[in-house]
Each structure stands twice: as C-alpha cells, then as structure tokens.
C-alpha cells in the first residue's frame, strides 16, 4: 500500500495501472501457492477447503520461527511443514468411511484459524526478520517503478513451480499415479495403488505449498502477524483452481489476475480516490463469483475436472 | 433383519428399532464431544493449565449461575437461527456455509428499514425490520442456491465468497453512505432509537431473540418432517436425479430451502441490531454465522436438535471471558475447542451402523 502511495504522488494517474501491476505481482503470491497446492490435491480426487486455515497457520508459524531463529527462510520451511501436517490431518480424517472431505475442510479451516490465533497471540508485538526481495528495477530512475519491480524470491519460485507441475503431472510416473487416483479410484486400486495413500501425499504437498503461501503474508507482504492478516485468500484460491480448470499454468495467470483485482482499491486510494474503497476490497471475491458463474455449467461436468472430485459431481 | 426391512418397506420401523436409532443419534455425538474434551484437555495441559480446573471454570461460566445461564441463552439465540441457515439447505444435500453473510445483510437491511421509518410506531418498525432482515438474508442465500441449481456453481464456495462480499458492503455502508458523523472511534450507522429496541423476556436479561429462535427451529422441524414440501426436499436430498425423474420441481425446492435458511440468519442479524447493538457496525460480523455451521453439523441438521446444541455452544462462548480472566488462556481458546469438536463430530460419522447395540433387530 505504501508502495502504491509513493507511485501515486510521483506519477499522478499513471500510478493506478502501475500500482495494479505492482500489486498483482506482490499480492498474487499467496494465491499462487495455495492454488498450486490445491490443484495437486484436487487432481488426486479430493478437495481441501481447509487451506484457508492452513494459510493462517503458515503465516503464524513462519512469523514465529523467523522471529525466534532470525532466519526468515527457516520460517518459510516451518510454515510449509505445518501445512503438510494439516494436509495429513485432512487426509487421515477423509480416509475414514462416510466422512465428507468438504465438511472436514470447513472444520480444519476453523481449527487452523483458531489455533493460529491461540499460539500466535504473543507474536503480534515483536518484529520478525522479513524475506529479502530482488531488485529488478535497478536500471530505472523513477522510484515508484523501482519499487514495483522489487520482486520477492517466493514469487519467482512460484513462477518456476507452475510449469514444473504441468510437466510433472503430464510426464512423470508420480504424475500419472496422481491423475489416476483423481480420475478413477477403481483403476488406481486395480493397478495396485492405495488411493488413500496417494491422496495423503497429494494433500500433504498441497498443505505444504499453502503453508508457504501463508508465510509470504506474514514475512513479506503485508509483512506482519495479526488476526486480520488473511481475509479469505485461501478460499478464493480454492475457487480459483476451478476457474483455472485444474491446470497449474492457468492457476498462475489466474493468481496474477486476482492479485491485480485486490490491488485496485489501494491503487485508486493512492491517487486520492477514496470513494468506495471498501467496495473495491470486495473486488477479488466478486470477480471469483462472476468467473465461476460464467465458467460453470449445470448440464455438463467441467472440462478438465478430475472425475473423482465430489465438488463437480451433481 | 429381514423383518426390519419388511417393516421399513411397510413404512414404519418397529418401535424398538426407532428408539435404538434415536439413541444412536444421541450417543455417538456425545462420544464425539467427550473425545473432543479429552483432546482439548491435553491441548491446554501443554499450556500448563489444569484441564479439570478449566472444565470446572467453563461450567461455572456457562451454566453455573443464573447470570451465566442468561448469558448462555442470549448467545444461543442467534446461533439457533444461523444454524438453520446450514441445516435447512442440508436437507437437499447442499453445504451452505454463508450464514455470516446472510446475518450481516439481514442486520444491514433491518437497520435501513428502521432508519427509513422515523416516527412510526415501534411495533410497525420492528415488523418492518424483521421483514427486511429476513428478505435480505433469504435472497443472499437463495442467490447461492440459484447459482448452484441453474449454473452449477459450487454452493459451499459461493456462499463463503458472499460472506466476504457482505462484510465489504457492511464496511462500505458504515464508513460511507450510512455513517453517523457522530461515531468517531467505531464507524456506525445512526441508532435505530431506544423505543424500537426489542426488550428482554420479563424477569430476565435474555432478549426475545431466544423465543424467535426456538419458534423458527420448531417451525423448521415441522416443515422438514411433517409437510409434503419437506418430504420432497428430503427425497431430492437423498437422490437428486431420482427426484428430477419423478418430476419434483427441484429448482423451486432449492430456492425455497435456501431462502428460508437465509431468512433465519437474516432474522438473527435483525435481532443482533434490535436487541443488542442498536445500530449497524463492524460488531455485526462477529463469527455467529461461523459457529452456526458447527451447531448445524453437531445437530446432524435436525432443526429441533439445533436448539440444545446452540445452548451448548452458546455456553462455551459465554465461558470464554471467564477462562480468559481466570486462567489466562487466549480468547481464541473457544475457537480451538470448537474446531476440535467439529473434527470429532465429523469423524464420528464413521461410527454410524458400526455399533452392534444400535443395529435394528426388528423388535
């Protein structure tokens, strides 16, 4: 927000598009990691709505570990590991008979948020070490442009991860097994694989990525830990996977789009337009809803939807 | 076994079997609650708090005195109503988790109705508030239901997105167009006026919202289990395709159930305004809708069971302040306990039909 404000003063109305683009890169990272993780989980045939809770737990853990050890990267790792534990919990409950993955996700969302607030209470005051950023705008003399081009390493990792996941799902043995579990549990069983075990792995990997997405919130942008840190980024990212048709590369572009939508309000505010600031905060959610309305259909299953996924079956 | 199936085909299971089935529905959630209390006990023991003392304090804060009972019942009132927002659509197999949004919209609409009728007799204002609140909440959830039925948009995600949109709308209105310039620290709308507030049940500090909640739950029970409409809804919930084949108007069922659920949560919002806050502000989004989801699942979406479960969860909420003051636990403890209860209740679904004692034996 501070960046966008600086952009506004120097560039006038040009600050708006610049703010949106800078914000898109900045704000999209949590969306990106959560949606890539959820994409993996859903390709194995299960949906984890608990990633909102995982995100908040990841943010708290990352911040706490960075504060205690002085190393933000240890914080990121710890956030990922806690996310994997949450994923394993989700998978363990879901492997019980007659237990619904959507409901377990809702429960884990509440539990994760509550636990993060409980443990994270003493972490609101102290200042933890932040993640570094890479300055890609060194060539420019315009300060706001330089700020806009200051990119976090996690974002770059996400940029590489998305095509890597596309490739991995398509070309590796692991990817094939994962997709088999998602398309037909019976087929996976007939091939001698344990569907529950595959989904355990996929949900843990998804939780790991979502935890890292959370650590970005607390360790880079907005870069603090408090109880209002996440406002539905996790659940928006889950919806975004449906919009992205379970394709990691489309998840990437969708995350950028959502980041830009989220940055619209602050960017407008930076040039003095405060009218409707709170309404612009709703932009990512309204955008998600509109996109789901446009892309879903009551008559056919969505192209690209894993056949085992409960959420797309009618 | 064969006799039991024969009886069910004849439309009435033997009395012993029905009792056993009812007992199963009480015993298994109770076991889940006990398991959750043990887990949470271990959890607080790690924070060096004696679990037994914790539960003693919680009991005192929730049900120990007349004062705490009043607090508990006051908190239960909106929970009954927001739980119906999840429980009614659940009859159709839909998972709606947007009660918080319907509550916020209901509270906003009720406030707007009251502010639009200055000088009208209080009863007329209150009726208009209730009507506006229920309509706004109902339409909000019916939107999620309609999107599900006519566009195939997942109702769980859309109803949650609608929560965030409703909260943004609330913030926009109380910070901007509806803001009372005199509210400096906490941006709010103008007050609806003391005369328009709904008071307490005589002899208590419990507001009338509790009575509204209980009436709504009883009506919902009759609707679901004693009317053709409810029967049709449960058929569709059991098998959507079969319901369409036999010609049930599934779309209308979905819209109506979602509207009624949302109307209940909207009424909760109206009550929060007219009995507690007196004006709309950020306090409206205090998580009552979220706790309502848990109430509905714990009650297995049975509208009558929602009442005692809401009292129980209201009690846990009421004891939150006391465990914070006496034992120094963070206020999020209640959320953690709720989360653990939720997980255990869902896991206990695996037990149904597994305990031989409850199996039907035709007697």
Image (cartoon, rainbow, N blue to C red):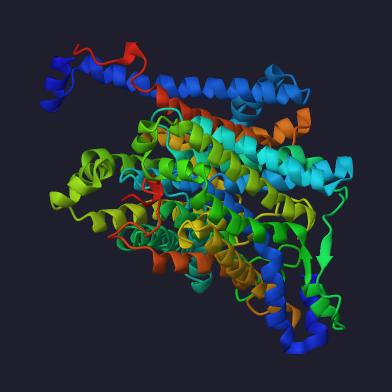
Q: Nearer the viewer, residue B257 or A226?
A: A226
* Residue B303 in which image quadrant: top left
Q: Nearer the viewer, residue A202 or B45?
A: A202
What percent of the width, then of the height, locates residue A217? 73, 55
Classify residue A60 as left or right of residue B309. right
Q: Nearer the viewer, residue B6 or B120?
A: B6
Classify residue B234 as left or right of residue B138. left
What percent of the width, then of the height, locates residue B216? 37, 45
Classify residue B9 as left or right of residue A178. left
* Residue B183 in which image quadrant: bottom right
Q: Vertically, is B189 above or below A80?
A: below
What percent of the width, then of the height, locates residue A286? 51, 68
Quarter of the image where the N terminus of chain A is located: bottom right
Q: Vertically, is B348 above or below A129?
A: above
Q: Vertically, is B191 above or below B319?
A: below
Q: How many marks?
A: 0
* Residue A116 in which image quadrant: top right
Q: Residue at x 52, y 28 (%)?
A: B344
Q: Vertically, is B49 above or below A104?
A: above
Classify residue A210 as left or right of residue A299. right
The answer to whether residue A135 is seen in the rendering is yes
What percent of the width, then of the height, locates residue A157? 70, 57
Q: Residue at x 44, y 37 (%)?
A: B297
Q: Nearer the viewer, residue B77 or B65?
A: B77
């Amino acid at each position: 927000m501070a960046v966008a404000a600086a952009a506004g003063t120097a560039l006038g109305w040009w600050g708006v598009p610049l703010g949106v683009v800078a914000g898109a890169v900045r704000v999209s990272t949590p969306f990106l990691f959560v949606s890539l993780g959820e994409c993996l989980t859903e390709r194995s045939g299960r949906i984890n709505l608990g990633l909102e809770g995982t995100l908040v737990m990841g943010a708290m853990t990352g911040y706490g570990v960075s504060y205690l050890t002085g190393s933000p990267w240890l914080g990121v790792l710890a956030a990922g590991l806690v996310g994997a534990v949450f994923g394993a919990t989700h998978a363990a409950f879901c492997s019980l008979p007659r237990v619904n993955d959507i409901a377990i996700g809702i429960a884990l969302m509440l539990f994760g948020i509550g636990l993060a607030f409980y443990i994270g209470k003493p972490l609101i005051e102290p200042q933890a070490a932040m993640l570094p950023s890479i300055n890609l705008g060194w060539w420019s003399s315009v300060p706001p442009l330089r700020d806009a081009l200051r990119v976090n390493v996690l974002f770059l990792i996400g940029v590489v991860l998305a095509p890597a996941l596309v490739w991995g799902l398509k070309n590796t043995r692991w990817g094939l097994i994962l997709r088999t579990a998602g398309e037909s549990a019976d087929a996976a069983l007939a091939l001698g694989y344990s569907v529950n075990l595959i989904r355990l792995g996929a949900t843990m990997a998804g939780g790991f990525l979502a935890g890292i997405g959370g650590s970005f919130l607390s360790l880079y942008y907005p870069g603090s830990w408090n109880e209002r840190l996440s406002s539905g980024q996790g659940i928006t990212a889950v919806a975004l996977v449906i919009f992205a048709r379970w394709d990691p590369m489309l998840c990437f572009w969708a995350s950028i789009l959502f980041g830009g939508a989220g940055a619209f309000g602050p960017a407008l505010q930076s040039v003095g337009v405060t009218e409707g600031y709170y309404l612009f905060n709703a932009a990512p959610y309204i955008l998600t809803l509109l996109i789901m309305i446009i892309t879903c259909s009551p008559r056919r299953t969505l192209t690209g939807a894993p056949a085992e996924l409960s959420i797309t079956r009618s | 076994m064969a006799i039991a199936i024969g009886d069910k085909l004849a439309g009435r299971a033997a009395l012993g079997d029905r009792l056993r089935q009812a007992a199963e529905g009480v015993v298994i959630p109770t076991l889940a609650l006990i398991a959750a209390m043990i887990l949470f006990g271990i959890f607080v023991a790690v924070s060096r708090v004696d679990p037994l003392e914790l539960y003693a304090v919680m009991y005192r804060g929730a049900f120990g005195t007349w004062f705490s009972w009043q607090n508990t019942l006051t908190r239960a009132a909106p929970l009954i109503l927001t739980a119906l927002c999840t429980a009614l659509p659940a009859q159709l197999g839909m998972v709606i988790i947007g009660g918080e949004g319907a509550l916020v919209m209901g509270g906003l609409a009720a406030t707007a109705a009251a502010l639009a009728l200055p000088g009208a007799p209080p009863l007329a204002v209150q009726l208009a508030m209730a009507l506006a609140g229920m309509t706004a909440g109902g339409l909000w959830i019916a939107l999620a239901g309609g999107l599900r039925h006519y566009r195939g948009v997942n109702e769980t995600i859309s109803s949650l997105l609608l929560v965030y949109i409703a909260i943004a709308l609330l913030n926009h209105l109380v910070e901007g167009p509806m803001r009372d310039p005199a509210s400096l620290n906490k941006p709010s709308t103008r007050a609806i006026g003391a005369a328009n507030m709904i008071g307490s049940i005589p002899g208590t500090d419990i507001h009338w919202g509790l009575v509204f909640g209980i009436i709504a739950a009883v009506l919902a029970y009759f609707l679901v289990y004693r009317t053709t409409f409810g029967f049709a809804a449960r058929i569709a919930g059991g098998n959507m395709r079969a319901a369409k084949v036999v010609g049930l108007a599934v779309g209308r069922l979905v819209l109506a159930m979602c509207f009624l659920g949302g109307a209940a949560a909207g009424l909760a919002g109206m009550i929060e305004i007219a009995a507690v806050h007196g004006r709309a502000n950020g306090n409206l989004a205090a998580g009552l809708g979220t706790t309502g989801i848990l109430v509905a699942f714990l009650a297995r979406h049975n509208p009558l069971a929602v009442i005692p479960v809401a009292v129980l969860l209201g009690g846990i909420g009421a004891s939150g302040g006391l465990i914070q003051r006496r034992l120094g636990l963070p206020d999020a403890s209640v959320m953690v306990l709720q989360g653990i209860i939720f997980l255990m209740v869902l896991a206990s679904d695996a037990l149904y039909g597994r305990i031989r004692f409850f199996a039907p034996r035709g007697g």
